[in-house]
Amino acid sequence: MRQRALTGAAYVALGALIALGPQFVFAICDQTEHGVTTCFWTARAELGVGGAAAALGLLVILLGRTPGVCAGLSAAFAVNGVLALLLPDVLIGVCEHPHMACRLATLPALNLIGALAALLGAANAARLLKKSGKGGKTDGDRA
């Protein structure tokens, strides 16, 4: 129970940082008179990804009584971490100017948090699958 609660709390905290970080903590650059920039849309997309990651953390706390369920939720959290990492780097991007706030603060922070979330989720899923004895083996493999 304690391990599950700590894991879920870590997922909620990382999800909250992914969602709210670009808005408040390591804010994106100010919008220009020419319209919204790519970092604005990245921050918007990270709201959804971080919200989903935080929700997965709550599900780990509330529903993760068995290792298999917890492993599935952790794998989903890892995918959210990869998505949080890809949004500012590949999928949407941030401003091109190297001295803008989104390049100096938001991009490195999202890269670090996204990588940490992906690694934490994947490591926990692998640990739980190994613990439950279902590390990739199906009933057909046992014959």
Image (cartoon, grey):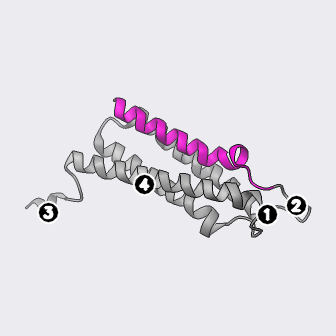
Whether 73 is among the magenta residues is: no
CB of mark 2 within 8 Å of CB of mark 4? no
Measure how far apart labels 4 and 3 are at the Cα level: 28 Å
User: Picture quarter containing residue 99?
Assistant: bottom right
Residue contact between numbered discs 4 and 3, judged by CB atoms under 8 Å: no
According to the picture, the residue beneath numbered tag 2 turns out to be 32
Is any atom of residue 56 visible in this view? yes
For residue 19, above or below residue 114: above
Residue type at mark 4: give it: Leu
Q: Secondary structure at mark 3?
A: helix
Of callouts 2 and 1, the N-terminal one = 2
Residue occupying image coordinates x 41% and y 32% = 5
* Left or right, 25 with reference to 68: right
Which is nearer the eye, 105 or 86?
A: 105
Badge number at residue 141? 3
Measured in 3D between alpha carbons, the distance from the residue under mark 4 to the one under mark 1, in whole angstroms, is 30 Å
| Inter-mark Cα distance, 2 to 3 | 59 Å
| Labels 2 & 3 near each other (Cβ < 8 A) | no
Q: Which residues are magenta?
A: 2-29
Of labels 3 and 1, earlier in sequence is 1
